[in-house]
Image: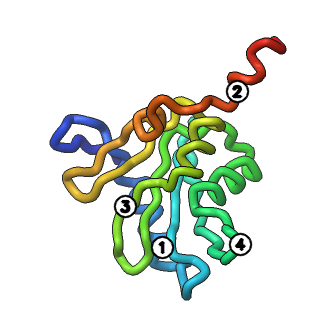
């Protein structure tokens, strides 16, 4: 289900609901506090939770990237993260923004809460960014 926000941007509510469901049912204790969901190009929804560790365990968005690859979903169109305990949609951290840009430069990220939720291109969340693939342009 896709709905319009006050700005007119399409928001994948089903994706938000999948992340919220995962947070409610899978996030337990201090090790798993954020859930993410992504929609693959073929329509599949892939979910995951963070694996907190003092050494810098992976965020939920990074877990979803790995889970999607394990399921053969290499093209993600939209991704969203939500906090446990009903904290709602949360924006990706800087590391996740860079990884998402590098892996899926056209991915949209859902940010904002409630009627302010909107899907924005990852490049808008990381302006004037380093593009990892640029170092390979001369090799082609």
Mark 3–mark 4 Cα distance, whole angstroms, equals 25 Å
For marks 2 and 4, the one nearer the N-term is: 4
In terms of depth relative to the viewer, which is nearer, 44 or 34? 34
In terms of depth relative to the viewer, which is nearer, 50 or 137? 137
Mark 3–mark 1 Cα distance, whole angstroms, equals 11 Å
* Residue under label 2: 133
Crowd around label 4: few <14 · some 14–19 · many ≥20 (10 Å): few
Secondary structure found at label 3: strand
Mark 3–mark 2 Cα distance, whole angstroms, equals 29 Å
Q: Quadrant of residue 4?
A: top left
Nearer the camera: disc 3 or disc 1 = 3
The label on residue 73 is none
For marks 2 and 1, the one nearer the N-term is: 1
* Residue under label 4: 55
The label on residue 23 is 1
User: Residue 22, image x and y in percent?
Assistant: 51, 70
């Amino acid at each position: 289900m896709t709905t319009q926000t006050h700005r007119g941007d399409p928001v994948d509510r089903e994706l938000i609901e999948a992340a919220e469901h995962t947070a409610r049912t899978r996030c337990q204790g201090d090790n798993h506090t954020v859930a993410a969901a992504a929609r693959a190009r073929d329509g599949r929804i892939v979910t995951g939770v963070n694996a907190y560790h003092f050494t810098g365990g992976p965020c939920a968005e990074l877990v979803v990237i790995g889970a999607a690859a394990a399921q053969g979903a290499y093209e993600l169109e939209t991704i969203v993260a939500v906090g446990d305990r009903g904290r709602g949609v949360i924006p990706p951290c800087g590391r996740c923004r860079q990884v998402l840009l590098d892996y899926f430069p056209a991915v949209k990220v859902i940010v904002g809460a409630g009627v302010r939720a909107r899907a924005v291109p990852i490049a808008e969340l990381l302006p004037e960014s380093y593009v990892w693939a640029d170092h390979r342009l001369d090799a082609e």
